[in-house]
């Protein structure tokens, strides 16, 4: 086995996604020495702008909404400009009868009873969401009850209108958590909506899918990484962490980095790809088994022109009864050709993945044609983003808890574990499951570490401020007081943090 390259830093950040790179930037700005270790050969994680047959597609996250102020601030700081998603003209809805109906506004052109039920349920949900703190949904007075019932069962208790149920479920299940509505709780649904400001905001496509970044949203991690320079190391999957209360050593196949703190900025389903010595406290080993990513196929189809616009259509389409449950005009800034993007979620994605690629493409294009006409069946470029087959993601868009998991474990998610911190968009309050949340969590973790290491650098605080690995669970595994493998880097004594930027 080749000799490991040995380095010392104040902080190791694992993962060069929006969370990790935001945290690393803040830590470096505070004068701490940082290294970012990224498993892939690129930065950005779930943000990835790529050329497919010469056509630029945003394969992962792309949209920005007006409430995502942390992301908007970051775009501003990085000098990145945005443009509005095309939305002129009518949207299309396909109901259970399979007929395409044009409409404007947010409420689908269903029958009068269904429309009234949809409007009533939006009001009920908005009221519940207003009572839900996205930073602590488990503190809702009815949290325990709301976390025991699936979102679908709750909807079935509220109305006997099947079409209303399918449509309301779509906004959280297919469109956000990318899990069937029977697989997560009402409380999890309320968190999702509260993190975006209200349930109405999720219904309003012009709000939630408002703008895109010229050149793609991956420009955020790319620009942050460029500024960090050699402190971002690609192709470095972290395999092992030796950790104690105040130090750690992080090992990849070629590097061993000794540090005072480690930020594990990867989605929760990947925490277990790393071996921890000593093992993580019981509550952490348990909680991460209750969080899982959903499944969605993001489909891109480019045509010589955005032909739907000439027909008076915006490119926006919805149907809980179609393979592609939602679609949008996704033409890139300044391009003449037109691109549609569509999404196939959870159990429908399972069914599509059982088909061979040619059959799958036919099924997707037939669904786009059902909304936009036969021209949709002949794209010049076609691509399916399949994040579930990516080793360093394994699903999309982000992680959510199973039934009961949020009340049982939610409060422990962002708790420090000795010298370790865990975070990603998947643990965010505002901006949960979005880049905005990733940035907020990255800022929060950096601020906590800066506060701790700043205090430790003061003469009066010579004893490291030992974080409590078992703070949330008395009796959990304690790290060794001084792990022989984990030394405090010399550079730490020179760190002069300037303060953080907590959310
Ligand atoms: C198809 C799709 C569409 C989306 N649409 C939107 C949207 O329109 N708007 C929006 O705001 N959000 C959207 N999202 C969500 C958004 O992309 C994510 O919430 C955000 O990018 C997550 O950032 P992160 O840094 O927390 O995690 P990630 O981006 O997952 O970054 C984690 C990084 O850690 C690395 N890593 C993992 N394990 C290890 C290891 N052991 N060692 C080293 N490195 C490791 C990974 O390679 C990755 O680079 C979408 C996501 C997907 C997949």
Image: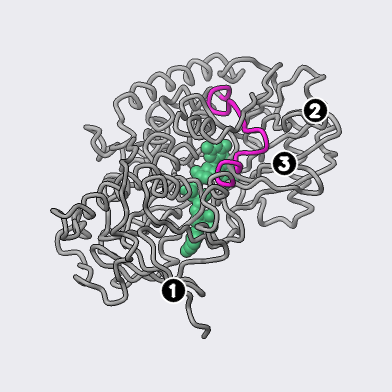
Mark 1 CB in 8 Å range of ligand 1?
no
- Is 197 contained in the magenta span? no
Q: Which is more N-terminal, label 3 or label 2? A: 3
> Circle 3 — which element?
strand
From the top left corner, tell me how far across and down residue 45 is, in percent: 55, 52
Q: Are marks 2 and 3 in contact (CB under 8 Å)?
A: no
Residue 65 in percent (x, y) is at 52, 27
SS under mark 1 = strand
Q: Which label was assigned to residue 300? A: 3
Nearer-the-camera pick, 334 or 135: 334
**In this picture, which residue range is highlighted in magenta?**
205-222
Q: Look at 79% across and 24% down and name the residue there.
A: 308
Q: x%, y% of residue 198?
A: 41, 25
Callout 2: helix, strand or loop?
loop
Q: Is mark 2 within 8 Å of ligand 1?
A: no
State the residue position of label 2: 306
On residue 89, the disc is: none
Q: Nearer the viewer, mark 3 or mark 1?
A: 1
The reply to whether the magenta stretch includes residue 213 is: yes
Q: Residue sitting at 70 percent across and 29 percent down?
A: 329
Q: Within 10 Å of the Cα at label 1, are there few (<14), some (14-19), or many (20+) other Cα atoms?
A: few
Q: Residue at x 58, y 44 (%)?
A: 223
């Amino acid at each position: 086995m080749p000799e490991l390259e040995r380095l010392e830093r104040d902080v190791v950040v694992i993962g060069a996604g929006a969370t990790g790179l935001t945290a690393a930037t803040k830590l470096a700005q505070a004068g701490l020495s940082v290294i970012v270790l990224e498993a892939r050969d690129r930065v950005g994680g779930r943000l990835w702008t790529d050329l497919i047959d010469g056509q630029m597609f945003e394969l992962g996250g792309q949209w920005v909404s007006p409430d995502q102020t942390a992301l908007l601030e970051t775009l501003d700081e990085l000098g990145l400009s945005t443009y509005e998603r095309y939305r002129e003209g009518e949207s299309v809805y396909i109901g259970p009868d399979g007929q395409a109906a044009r409409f404007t506004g947010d409420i689908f052109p269903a029958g009068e009873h269904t429309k009234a039920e949809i409007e009533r349920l939006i009001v009920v949900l908005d009221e519940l969401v207003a009572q839900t703190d996205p930073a602590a949904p488990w503190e809702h007075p009815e949290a325990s009850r709301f976390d025991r019932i699936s979102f679908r069962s709750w909807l079935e208790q509220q109305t006997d209108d099947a079409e209303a149920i399918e449509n309301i479920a779509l906004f959280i299940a297919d469109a956000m958590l990318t899990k069937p509505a029977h697989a997560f709780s009402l409380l999890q649904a309320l968190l999702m909506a509260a993190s975006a400001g209200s349930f109405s905001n999720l219904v309003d496509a012009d709000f939630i899918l408002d703008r895109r970044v010229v050149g793609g949203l991956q420009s955020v991690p790319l620009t942050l990484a460029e500024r960090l320079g050699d402190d971002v190391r690609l192709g470095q999957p972290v395999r092992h962490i030796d950790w104690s209360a105040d130090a750690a050593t992080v090992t990849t196949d070629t590097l061993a980095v000794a540090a005072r703190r480690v930020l594990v900025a990867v989605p929760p389903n990947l925490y277990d790809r790393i071996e921890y010595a000593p093992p993580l406290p019981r509550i952490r080993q348990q909680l991460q088994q209750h969080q899982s990513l959903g499944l969605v196929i993001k489909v891109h189809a480019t045509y010589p022109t955005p032909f739907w616009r000439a027909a008076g259509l915006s490119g926006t389409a919805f149907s809980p009864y179609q393979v592609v449950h939602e679609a949008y005009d996704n033409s890139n800034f300044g391009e003449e050709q037109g691109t549609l993007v569509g999404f196939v979620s959870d159990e429908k994605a399972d069914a599509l993945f059982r088909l061979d690629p040619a059959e799958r493409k036919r099924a997707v294009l037939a669904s786009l044609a059902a909304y936009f006409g036969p021209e949709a069946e002949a794209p010049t470029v076609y691509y399916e983003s399949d994040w579930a087959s990516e080793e360093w993601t394994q699903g999309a868009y982000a992680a959510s808890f199973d039934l009961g998991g949020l009340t049982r474990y939610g409060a422990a998610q962002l708790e420090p574990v000795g010298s370790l911190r865990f975070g990603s968009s998947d643990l965010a309050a505002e901006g949960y499951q979005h880049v905005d949340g990733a940035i907020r969590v990255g800022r929060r973790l950096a601020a906590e570490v800066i506060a701790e290491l700043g205090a430790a650098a003061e003469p009066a605080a010579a004893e490291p401020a030992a974080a409590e690995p078992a703070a949330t669970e008395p009796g959990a595994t304690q790290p060794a007081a001084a792990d022989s493998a984990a030394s405090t880097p010399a550079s730490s004594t020179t760190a002069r943090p300037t303060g953080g930027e907590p959310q």
